[in-house]
Image (cartoon, rainbow, N blue to C red):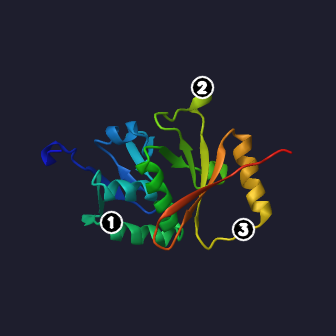
């Protein structure tokens, strides 16, 4: 691809717990990045890191342009799990999936099938969340009760539950845990 035909990075500003784009963000919003709030796009740290790494946004703090390591360092101060969350987010987005925060479901991410847009209100069967995802390091341990709650939650919203396990090299392996009724 000709470098001159690449889209110009969207200007964004780092705030305490998010990155804000105030102009030219429509192409990002159309690809289901961030949350449109009035006349701006609010990006979580994993989204901002992903877009910054790919040259789709340029992030400033005050008047200083931030490189990926500086934004990652700031994000780590706010969320000690950001590295495994980012590894899982990057893997899912690189697969062409739409990834949104899973905060309201008690997980790290909710993921939609390729080609499905995120929308509010009534949805067709294929428009619902396909997977809820937990990002964990490879040495993570949990009680069966935690695992059971996660599977029940996924089942209650007609989604599948995935654990995105991040190894020490940053590679991600996904495990699906399902409920089987004998």
Front residue of 43 and 16: 43
Front residue of 18 and 165: 165
Work out whether mark 1 precedes mark 2 in sequence or the reverse, and give the earlier one: 1
Q: State the quadrant of the C terminus.
A: top right
Give me the disc on residue 36.
none
Give me the disc on residue 68.
1
Is residue 15 toward the left or the right of residue 104 in the image? left
Is residue 131 toward the left or the right of residue 114 in the image? right
Q: Is residue 121 visible in the rendered structure shown here? A: no
Q: Badge 1: how crowded within 10 Å, few (<14), some, or many (20+)?
A: some
Q: Are marks 1 and 2 in contact (CB under 8 Å)?
A: no
Q: Nearer the viewer, mark 1 or mark 2?
A: 2
* Vertical position of residue 133 compared to residue 85: above or below: above
Residue that carries the numbered disc 3 in the rendered image: 142
Residue that carries the numbered disc 2 in the rendered image: 124
Q: Residue furthest front?
A: 182
**Badge 3 element:** loop
């Amino acid at each position: 691809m000709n470098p001159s035909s690449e889209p110009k990075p969207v200007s964004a500003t780092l705030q305490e717990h998010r990155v804000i784009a105030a102009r030219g963000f429509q192409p990002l919003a159309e690809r289901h990045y961030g949350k449109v709030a009035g006349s701006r796009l609010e990006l979580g740290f994993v989204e901002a890191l992903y877009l910054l790494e790919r040259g789709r946004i340029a992030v400033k703090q005050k008047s200083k342009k931030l490189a990926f390591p500086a934004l990652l360092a700031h994000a780590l101060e706010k969320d000690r799990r950001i590295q495994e969350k980012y590894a899982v987010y990057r893997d899912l987005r690189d697969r062409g999936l739409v990834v949104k925060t899973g905060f309201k479901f008690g997980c790290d991410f909710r993921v939609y099938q390729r080609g499905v847009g995120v929308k509010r209100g009534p949805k067709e069967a294929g428009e619902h969340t396909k997977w809820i995802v937990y990002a964990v390091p490879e040495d993570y341990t949990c009680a069966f009760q935690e695992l059971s709650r996660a599977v029940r939650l996924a089942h209650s919203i007609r989604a599948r539950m995935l654990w995105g396990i991040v190894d020490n090299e940053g590679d991600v392996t996904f495990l699906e845990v399902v409920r089987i009724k004998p």
